[in-house]
Image: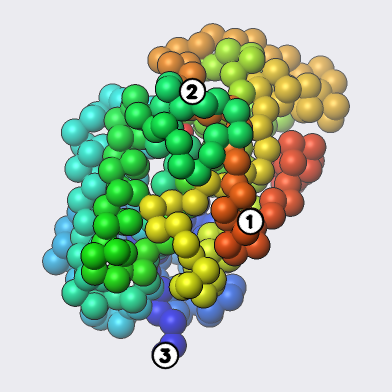
């Protein structure tokens, strides 16, 4: 059967690059981008686009029927920092959109789902280093609670109804094509923009806050790899741990200074510090490597070179 793919939340940080990558692989007309608002020109002009509210089941069902969609990537979500400000809105968006898609698959209206989880499923009682796939979780943020609940529902729908849902716990993602919005790891993108435009950056996290991060090209590669894996190889149906690099704001600033020697960083931690403090510093992703051959390519040096070159051009 021909693939017909719907991306929900296509204009966001991951959605934009994911849509472009999927269009490259499967052809522009087979990949329908959708979002609650319009996105960047590249995305809008390269294939079909629909304005779609992921919490509206009927609208979703209509788009799926119209384009004979068989695969859905549900990328719409409210991220950690914004979710702390609007807990109920975050819960409603993050959970209702997931239930809509899971129920459409349960009713056999779609065959396969990708849904992103996050390192935010872990909490202050989780072991901090090399955090394993299955360990103490107890997330202390609204976003983390929604992602952990979502993981349990994905696992439930797989075992109870045979829904082919696949998921990754993304770390902080670093990209130059689209800005992130409302996350705690956003500093790791903002810093490059400010280093180039102003030569200085005030970081909202402390200098020694270590967090797991990944360059977007690796994140997209992992997503496509997981979705291409044979169903019997996808042994984790809640969400896979995924790792590429871990660093602190100070280490990142040092790396930028190798390219921009005058770059200066200062620190003014705000409410996002508590969120970051509740998350792991590094992640053990042996299940993803074992089950579908995951291997990261970008470390901090390579990411920094790529970010500065692309943002400067
Ligand atoms: C956030 O900071 O909220 C996200 C995430 C780690 O899921 N980037």
Position in image of residue 99 (x %, y %)? 22, 56
Query: Which badge, 3 or 2, comes first in the chain's sequence?
Result: 3
Is label 3 in a helix, a strand or a loop?
Answer: loop
Residue 259 sits in quarter: top right
Q: Where is residue 92 drawn, in percent x and y? A: 20, 43
Identify the secondary structure beneath mark 1: helix
Tag 1–tag 2 contact (CB < 8 Å):
no
Q: Earlier in the sequence, mark 3 or mark 1?
A: 3
Q: Is residue 291 above or below residue 37?
A: below
Residue to which mark 1 is pinned: 289
Does the residue tagged 2 have its C-beta within 8 Å of any atom of ligand 1? no
Give percent across and percent down for residue 217. Answer: 64, 54
Residue nearest the observer in this picture, 46 or 5: 5
Gap in angstroms between the C-alphas marked 3 and 1? 29 Å
- The image quadrant of residue 73 is bottom left
Distance in Å between CA atoms under marks 1 and 2? 26 Å
Q: Residues within 10 Å of mark 1 (few under 14, many from 20)?
A: some
Q: Residue at x 45, y 57 (%)?
A: 236
Residue at image location 74% in from the left, 51% down from the top: 297
Residue carrying label 3: 1
Q: Nearer the viewer, mark 3 or mark 1?
A: 1
- Decide which of tag 1 and tag 2 comes sooner along the chain: 2
Relative to 312, say whether 127 is above or below.
Answer: above
Q: Is residue 145 left or right of residue 42?
A: left
**Badge 3: how crowded within 10 Å, few (<14), some, or many (20+)?**
few
Residue 112 is marked as none
Q: Which mark is residue 276?
A: 2
* 77 sits to left or right of 284: left
């Amino acid at each position: 059967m021909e693939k017909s793919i719907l991306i929900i939340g296509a204009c966001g940080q991951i959605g934009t690059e994911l849509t472009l990558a999927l269009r490259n692989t499967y052809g522009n007309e087979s990949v329908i981008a959708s979002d609650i608002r319009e996105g960047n020109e590249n995305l809008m002009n390269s294939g079909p686009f629909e304005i779609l509210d992921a919490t509206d089941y009927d609208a979703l069902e209509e788009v799926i029927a119209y384009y004979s969609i068989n695969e859905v990537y549900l990328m719409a979500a409210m991220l950690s920092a914004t979710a702390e400000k609007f807990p109920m809105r975050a819960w409603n968006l993050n959970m209702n959109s997931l239930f809509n898609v899971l129920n459409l698959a349960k009713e056999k209206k779609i065959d396969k789902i990708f849904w992103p989880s996050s390192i935010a499923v872990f909490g202050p009682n989780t072991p901090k280093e090399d955090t394993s796939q299955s360990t103490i979780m107890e997330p202390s943020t609204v976003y983390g609670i929604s992602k952990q609940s979502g993981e349990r529902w994905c696992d439930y729908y797989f075992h109870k109804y045979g829904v082919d849902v696949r998921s990754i716990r993304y770390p902080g993602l670093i990209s130059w094509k689209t800005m992130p919005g409302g996350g705690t790891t956003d500093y790791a993108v903002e810093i490059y923009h400010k280093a180039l435009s102003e030569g200085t950056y005030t970081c909202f996290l402390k200098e020694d806050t270590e967090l797991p991060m990944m360059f977007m090209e690796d994140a997209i590669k992992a997503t496509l790899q997981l979705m291409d894996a044979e169903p019997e190889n996808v042994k984790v149906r809640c969400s896979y741990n995924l790792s590429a690099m871990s660093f602190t704001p100070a280490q990142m600033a040092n790396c930028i200074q190798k390219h921009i020697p005058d770059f200066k960083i200062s620190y003014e931690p705000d409410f996002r510090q508590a969120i970051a403090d509740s998350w792991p510093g590094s992640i053990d992703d042996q299940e993803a490597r074992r089950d579908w051959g995951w291997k990261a390519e970008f470390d901090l040096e390579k990411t920094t070179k790529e970010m500065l070159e692309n943002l400067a051009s």
